[in-house]
Every structure is written in C-alpha cells, then in structure tokens.
Image (cartoon, rainbow, N blue to C red):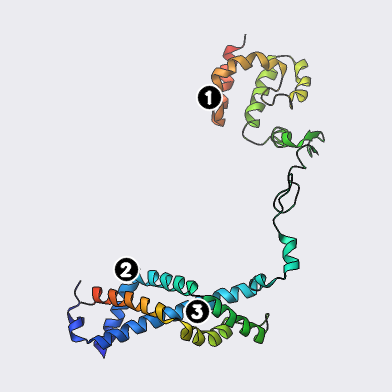
Amino acid sequence: MNKEARLKASINQKLTETGERDRLKELLRAKLTECGWKDQMKAQCKEVIKEKGLEHVTVEDLVVEVTPKGRALVPDSVKKELLQRIRGFLSQHAS
Amino acid sequence: MKMEELSVSSLDNSKLEALAQDILSDLVEDACLGLCFEVHRAVKQGYFFLDDTDQESMRDFEIVDQPGLDVFGQVYNQWKNKECVCPNCSRSIAASRFAPHLEKCLGMGRNSSRIANRRIVTGNNTNNKSESDQEDNDDVNDNDWSYGAEKKAKKRKSDKVLLFSPCINVFIVFIYKTSAV
C-alpha cells in the first residue's frame, strides 16, 4: 500500500513539474466545450440559480448540485482520449 | 529517470489503470469546479443571463453604420471647432490649440521653461517695447515669444539639437550672450 501511495505522489509531482497536468487540463476543457458538455452544464446551473434565487446562490450551491452531474455527463470519447494520454505519460515516467 | 523501488514491474496493470482513472477523476473535478466559479462570477457580475435578452431589446444595441457617427451612434468630431476658455488668462482658444496654449500659459510642460529662459535673455538684450507684442504671437507661432528674438531664430537652427534637454538651458544662455551684437 505504501509503495502505491508513494508512486501516486511521485507521479502527481511529475505531472505538475513537467507541465503535463496543465496541458491535460487545457485539453480536457477544450474537448468538453467542443462536445457541448459546457453548455449542458450551464443549463444545469441555470436550474440551480432559478431554484435558489439569483441574489442568493453561492459557489457551494453550484458545486454541490452540479458536480455529480458533471462527472456523469462527460462523454466516453473524451474520457478515452484523456486516459490514453495519461497512460502514455505513466509508461514514460513510471519505468 | 529511474525510481528503483517504485518500478512498473512491481505493480500490475490494473493498479496503473486505477492510477490513470484517479488522475482523470481529478482533472474532471477540476473542470467542474472551474465551471462553477465561472458561472458564479457571471451571476454575481450580472452577465450570466445576457444572451437571454429578447429580440426587441437587442435592436437597441445593434452596431450603427452611418457616416459621421461611431459604432455607438455618437457624433465623434463635434468638438473640433469649439472654443475653450483658458482658466488662467481667460482668453478664448480654439480646441486644437488649447493644450499647447495651456502648457505655455501655466508655465508647465517640456518647452515652457526653455522659452521662459529665452524670454529672460532676450528681455535683457532688447528693449521692453517688444515685450508687449509677445502675447499676440502665442497662437501664430508657439516657438517665438517676441519680435526681438526673430534674428536669433536663424541662429537657433544650428542649436536645435541642444534644445531638447532642460539641463542645457544654462549652456544656451551663454551662447546667446556671446552671439549678441
């Protein structure tokens, strides 16, 4: 267990250090906008806002209501592409 | 770079896969949070529902394409021929000459201290009659303050390069003194 945790920590560090994490973030954001996920999520947010009222909605409200749906709505193709890149990074840096 | 204790051979593929899924999960969570912040800011700043405006109101904000107007429909050259009253000397000055006039009038700006110095010098060399004509020259030629200085204007051309630095003022005074006949 300990070895795994250490590996995970070291991989995360590598991801940040090499800038790969930022590149992956950008890639994910671009893909999600492209496939319409962002617009879907904005519609969800509108629901929450109408429910809670424009003046009183907080970041917490949005996060709690919208994040689970967000995770579920990510298309498989996007997931696959990101996973591919991540696996490539792992094989490069974990051997 | 090798991590001896942490090599792939000691971990099977499923663990690596789990790691990859974890990383993906982190990234997705990050994206969701980012979106929430973006939306929340848009709500609080008031621009979230902007694209829901009805067609009627949208027409109020269409780009204006008429001659003489800018894209907002405002007239943009109406101040060209206006006259402004100088707060210092209470004269009426044309708008395009107003800024240079203020520079001289208030005694600020790059050229006014040089010109003031020149006035002192030429005021000493020529008689006081020409000084009363100085004010009228203001709008005609901002670089000449008195008729007495016109002769010096020709000589001044060779000194033009020196005039750009205020610390050379003292130097210029000496030049004029030696060239005065």
Label 3: state its secondary structure: helix
Left or right: where A3 falls relative to B115: left
Chain of the residue under label 1: B
* Residue A33 appears in the picture as rendered: yes
Residue B150: which quarter of the image? top right
- Whether tag 3 and tag 2 are in contact, CB under 8 A, the answer is no
Same chain, labels 2 and 1 = no
For the residue pair B178 and B42, the one nearer the viewer reads as B42
Residue B138: which quarter of the image? top right
Image quadrant where one finds the N terminus of chain B: bottom left
Alpha carbon distance from label 3 to label 1: 62 Å
Q: Is residue A1 above or below residue B127?
A: below
Q: Amino acid at mark 2?
A: Thr
- In the picture of the structure, the residue carrying the numbered disc 2 is A18
Chain of the residue under label 3: B
State the image coordinates of residue B128 (x, y, percent, origin top left).
Answer: 76, 17
- Whether tag 3 and tag 1 are in contact, CB under 8 A, the answer is no
